[in-house]
């Protein structure tokens, strides 16, 4: 029986490693391209060069796009965390017949194709005069980030013992006190995970920005998009390496937080 299990597990392991390699190898190719000695996207031939990283860190246009993306991502993440956490807690406390439809409604921004949502948002933002404004982009990113927060917080609440809330209320705690001292500390991993996913989503979002931003807002993904259309600047590969490193660090942080808060 053990030999059979080993025989069956080998194809499974090989299949898993094949999928991992298929996902990772295209990303890893960006690293040598970012150190190319040419002025166009290609693998290095004679030597490795860091001039494209230097160009990224000294270019006013690239630094401005990085700053805009960072500010928009932080602002939209804060809004999404507040709205998504409260929504998840509210759906958890009410009757499932009422909470489940609300959860589905909150998931619509990621269920609907992004280009359809962006097109509708463009028409709506015209009437509100929010096109090409930080407010418009932040709100749009926050709305599309809320589902990630709702999902992660709802998952944390699924393992929360409601008797802790009942005990707090029976001891005289008000609803805000119960929320602040009992519920929120117990679902911190879900809240932090939702914040990480919301930040990454806003940082990488492109389609919505292409529709509702023009000249005033030039985020990092849009700068990369324009670079691909106009000229194949290897600086884009340097940016991609930094984005991969940032995403990896955020995911490792998420795993560390979950491991630290996991029950013994």
Image: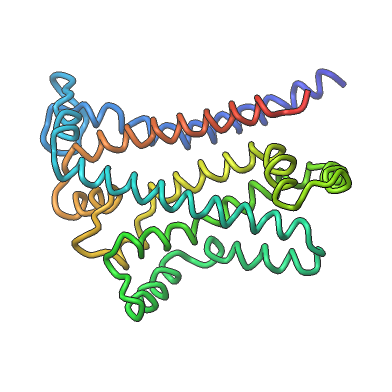
Residue 254 against residue 221 in the figure, above or below? above
Residue name at image x 14 percent, y 49 percent? 231
Q: Nearer the viewer, residue 48 or 145?
A: 145
Q: Is residue 264 above or below residue 181?
A: above
Q: Which residue is most to the front? A: 172
Seen in the picture, residue 86 relative to 157 is either above or below; the reply is: below
Q: Is residue 3 left or right of residue 81?
A: right
Residue 134 position within the rendered picture, expressed as x and y whole percent measured from the top left: 31, 59
Residue at (19% x, 42% y) in the render: 62
Looking at the image, which is closer to me, 201 or 43?
201
Q: Residue furthest left?
A: 39
Q: How many marks?
A: 0
**The quadrant where residue 131 appears:** bottom left
For image coordinates 39% across by 48% down, the residue present is 73
Asked whether 234 or 45 is in front, the reply is 234
Please state the horizontal and vertical placement of residue 109, each as a whole percent of the image. 53, 64
Q: Position of residue 29 (x, y in %)?
A: 33, 31
Quarter residue 98 falls in: bottom right
The quadrant where residue 118 appears: bottom left
Query: Is 113 situated left or right of 221 in this image?
Result: right
Residue closest to the far bottom: 127
User: In the image, is residue 197 above or below residue 103?
Assistant: above
Residue at left 14%, top 41%? 60
Residue 19 x %, y %: 54, 36
Q: Where is the C terminus found, in terms of image quarters?
A: top right
Horizontal side of residue 69 vs 1, given as left or right: left
Q: Which quadrant of the figure contains the N terminus?
A: top right
């Amino acid at each position: 029986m053990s030999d059979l299990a080993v025989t069956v597990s080998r194809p499974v392991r090989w299949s898993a490693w094949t999928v991992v390699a298929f996902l990772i190898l295209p990303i890893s190719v960006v690293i040598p391209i970012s150190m190319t000695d040419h002025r166009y996207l290609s693998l290095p031939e004679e030597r490795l060069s860091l001039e494209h990283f230097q160009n990224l860190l000294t270019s006013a246009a690239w630094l401005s796009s990085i700053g805009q993306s960072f500010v928009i991502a932080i602002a939209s993440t804060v809004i999404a965390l507040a709205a998504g956490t409260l929504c998840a807690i509210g759906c958890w406390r009410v009757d499932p017949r009422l909470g489940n439809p609300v959860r589905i409604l909150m998931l619509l921004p990621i269920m609907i194709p992004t280009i359809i949502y962006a097109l509708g948002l463009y028409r709506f933002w015209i009437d509100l005069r929010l096109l090409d404004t930080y407010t418009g982009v932040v709100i749009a990113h926050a709305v599309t980030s809320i589902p990630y927060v709702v999902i992660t917080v709802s998952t944390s609440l699924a393992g929360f013992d409601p008797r802790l809330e009942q005990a707090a209320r029976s001891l005289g705690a008000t609803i805000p006190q119960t929320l602040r001292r009992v519920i929120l500390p117990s679902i911190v991993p879900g809240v932090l995970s939702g914040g990480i996913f919301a930040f990454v989503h806003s940082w990488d979002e492109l389609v919505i920005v292409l529709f509702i931003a023009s000249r005033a807002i030039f985020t990092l993904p849009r700068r990369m998009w324009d670079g691909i259309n106009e000229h194949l600047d290897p600086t884009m590969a340097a940016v991609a390496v930094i984005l991969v490193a940032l995403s990896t660090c955020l995911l490792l942080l998420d795993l560390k937080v979950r491991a630290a808060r996991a029950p013994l």
